[in-house]
């Protein structure tokens, strides 16, 4: 114990000493590390280290050479913390090469001229003559059907020729009407596009002398999402689709706009959105569920919530409606505790569960038509699927009217108050009262996606078990698109046009036997997209992963129990088991070993385990009177096993 404490203290001290070296090297490079510059020359500068008398400069277009100071990258020693490149008498005297990435390093030299402190390798890239930084991003998905395309012009470009269409080969060749003309600004609006369609575009840049042909970029518009449930009128999964918007999966196209700087973070089902107290989302044009001020339809709200920040507060999860008592709907936290409430400025009712800060909770509130805030007149709160209402006798009616768009993260009227701190996932609005069973189903995520994937996500599995992938089909799935690779990014990005082997084909069965040999120790990523009966509607799954264990399994001890599979029947010890007069019997092997635990339901160890839920307890006594002077347990094989299969040595 004391050795470990001393070792940790020494390690912490070593980190502290290593950190002090940062004060002896150059810092704050200009251009910034990884920057892009618009000129064919550069004035390099940096903050000199305290005590540096001069600076050795290394510069080149090869990172390894600059790091090692080889291949002529040493550019000289200077006393000022600056250095010009791209001029006569300096590196690249004819000017920096357009489109080239350059690397540089500054070693600080002490006054003795001998002590040098090696600096970091920094880089910058000179803008090339071709268009770059497309918006939408290349390969982007869920792009609005009325986009405005833009890009960063190539170096010196004064005119831009736009090619646009739904066929990559035509755009590459500039044929079939894809030439949309010459533009003086780096923008192009193609008009209203088709849903769920991939488009391709190319920009050729002209600098007054030469036309520089651009690469072909692509993006895919918002999918044609069918209405899944006519009463589910807003469904925001809070997944990062790479669009900067919040996609509505209800089929009603109630897309959300992010304000402030909310962040996508891991959630309960895919991503979630995290709010830090000055962020919010507006569902543009969607007014929520409203009535005329006297007659109000039923509605339900469900969401996964992870509350952060101080206890209480009055952070608003979802809000809509108009000003005036009773005319709005605010689903928010109750000031002073972590209970949730709904209110309209003319009454409120609360759930009777205080959410635990930092933990995910599924919450729902259901409101019958023309309800009041009285606890027994049609309003229910659910927490992880269980009803829990706080008694209330407030007779005020619940009748939000149409005005402000639905908002998440701050007060319904955007006045900059009631900021929510925490994360939201899978937010839904229904125009009906959900039953308890329906609330439970909403907790499970999108029922149209494959689930119950085997091997389990992020699991370590044995090579034979991983050879066949299986899953439970999503609702309405007729076929299944399978993707598999060793790169998560590749599996995420792939579609049915893939020709690299990631796309494994469209399967009828809900299982797939991997045709290739898997590798020990390798992590694999796979994805199942569910295909509807029409063969065109596809519900995209999320990547799952498994790692192949780097050994062949002999016994994982998970199948033993006290009823018909005691562990000592398989693993023979010194005690033996049974009776010689009948039934399974072993006289014992005569050694000092004892296997199993008669006090557990599995006859195994159930607390101290390495993986799974069971381990084999083994006691040994090499000085036991009447027994051999060693302890041994054995398992008799009932069939031949190949211990060299899959290349094991």
Image (tube, rainbow, N blue to C red):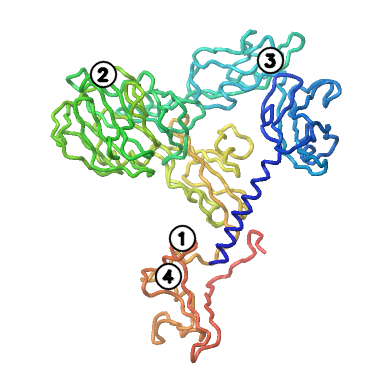
User: Do the residues under discs 1 and 4 have CB atoms within 8 angstroms?
Assistant: no
The numbered mark, 1 or 3, whose residue comes first in the sequence reads: 3
Q: Nearer the viewer, mark 2 or mark 4?
A: 2
Q: Nearer the viewer, mark 1 or mark 2?
A: 2
User: Do the residues under discs 1 and 2 have CB atoms within 8 angstroms?
Assistant: no
- In x, y percent, where is residue 171? 64, 18
In percent of the image, x 49 and y 26: which residue is there? 244
Q: Which residue occupies the extreme bottom position in the image? A: 626
Q: Quadrant of residue 580?
A: bottom left
The numbered mark, 2 or 4, whose residue comes first in the sequence reads: 2
The residue where tag 4 is placed is: 604
Alpha carbon separation for disc pair 1 and 3: 59 Å
In percent of the image, x 51 and y 41: which residue is there? 543
Taking the image as shown, residue 46 lies to the left or right of residue 247, namely right
The residue nearer to you, when weighing 554 against 517, is 554
Disc 4 secondary structure class: loop
Alpha carbon separation for disc pair 2 and 4: 65 Å
Callout 1: 10 Å neighbours few (<14), some, many (20+)?
few
- In x, y percent, where is residue 291? 22, 20
Vertical position of residue 450 compared to residue 95: above or below: below
The residue where tag 3 is placed is: 204
Disc 3 secondary structure class: strand
In percent of the image, x 67 and y 22: which residue is there? 215
Vertical position of residue 499 compared to residue 292: above or below: below
Callout 4: 10 Å neighbours few (<14), some, many (20+)?
many
The residue where tag 2 is placed is: 323
Q: Quadrant of residue 135?
A: top right
Callout 3: 10 Å neighbours few (<14), some, many (20+)?
many
């Amino acid at each position: 114990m004391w050795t470990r404490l001393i070792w940790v203290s020494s390690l912490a001290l070593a980190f502290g000493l290593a950190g002090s070296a940062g004060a002896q090297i150059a810092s704050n490079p200009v251009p910034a590390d990884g920057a892009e510059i618009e000129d064919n020359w550069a004035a390099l500068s940096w903050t000199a280290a305290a005590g540096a008398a001069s600076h050795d400069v290394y510069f080149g277009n090869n990172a390894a050479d600059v790091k090692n100071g080889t291949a002529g990258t040493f550019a000289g020693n200077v006393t000022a913390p600056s250095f010009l490149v791209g001029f006569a008498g300096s590196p690249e005297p004819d000017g920096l090469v357009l489109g080239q990435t350059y690397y540089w390093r500054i070693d600080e030299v002490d006054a003795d001229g001998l002590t040098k402190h090696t600096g970091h390798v920094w880089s910058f890239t000179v803008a090339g003559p071709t268009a770059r930084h497309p918006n939408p991003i290349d390969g982007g998905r869920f792009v609005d059907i009325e986009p405005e395309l833009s890009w960063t012009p190539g170096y010196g470009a004064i005119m831009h020729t736009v090619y646009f269409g739904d066929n990559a080969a035509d755009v590459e060749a500039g044929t079939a009407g894809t030439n949309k003309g010459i533009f003086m600004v780096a923008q192009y609006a193609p008009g209203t596009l088709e849903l769920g369609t991939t488009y391709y575009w190319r920009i050729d840049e002209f600098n007054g002398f030469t036309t520089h042909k651009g690469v072909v970029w692509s993006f895919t518009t918002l999918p044609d999402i069918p209405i899944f449930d006519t009463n589910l009128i807003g469904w925001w999964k809070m997944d990062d689709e790479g669009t900067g918007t919040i996609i509505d999966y209800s089929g009603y196209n109630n897309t959300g706009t992010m304000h402030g700087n909310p962040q996508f973070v891991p959630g309960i089902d895919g991503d979630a959105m995290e709010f830090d107290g000055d962020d919010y989302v507006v569902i543009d044009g969607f007014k929520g569920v409203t009535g005329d001020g006297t007659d109000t339809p039923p509605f339900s709200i469900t969401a996964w919530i992870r509350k952060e920040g101080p206890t209480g507060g009055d952070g608003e999860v979802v809000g809509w409606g108009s000003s005036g008592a009773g005319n709005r709907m605010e689903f928010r936290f109750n000031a002073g505790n972590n209970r949730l409430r709904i209110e309209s400025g003319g009454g409120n009712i609360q759930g009777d569960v205080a959410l635990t800060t930092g933990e995910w909770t599924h919450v729902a509130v259901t409101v019958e038509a023309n309800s009041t805030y009285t606890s027994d007149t049609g309003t229910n709160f659910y927490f992880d699927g269980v009803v829990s209402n706080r008694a209330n006798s407030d007779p005020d009616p619940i009748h939000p009217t149409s005005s402000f768009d639905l908002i998440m993260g701050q007060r319904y009227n955007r006045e900059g108050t009631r900021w929510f701190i925490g994360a939201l996932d899978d937010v839904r609005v229904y125009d009906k009262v959900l039953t308890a069973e329906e609330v439970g189903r909403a907790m499970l995520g999108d029922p149209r996606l494959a689930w119950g994937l085997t091997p389990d996500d992020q699991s370590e599995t044995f090579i034979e078990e991983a050879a066949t992938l299986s899953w439970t089909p999503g609702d309405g799935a007729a076929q299944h698109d399978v993707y598999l690779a060793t790169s998560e990014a590749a599996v995420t990005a792939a579609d049915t046009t893939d020709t690299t082997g990631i796309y494994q084909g469209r399967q009828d069965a809900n299982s797939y036997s991997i045709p290739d040999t898997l590798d020990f120790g390798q992590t694999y990523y796979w994805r199942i997209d569910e295909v509807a009966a029409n063969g065109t509607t596809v519900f995209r799954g999320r990547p799952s992963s498994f790692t192949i264990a780097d050994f062949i399994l002999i016994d994982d001890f998970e199948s033993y129990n006290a009823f018909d599979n005691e562990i000592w029947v398989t693993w023979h010890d010194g005690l033996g088991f049974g009776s010689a007069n009948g039934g399974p019997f072993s006289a014992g092997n005569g050694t000092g070993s004892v296997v199993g635990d008669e006090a557990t339901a599995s006859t195994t160890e159930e607390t101290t385990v390495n993986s799974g839920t069971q381990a084999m307890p083994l006691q040994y006594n090499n000085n036991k009177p009447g027994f051999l002077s060693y302890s041994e347990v054995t398992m008799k094989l009932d069939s031949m096993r190949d211990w060299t299969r899959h290349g094991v040595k």
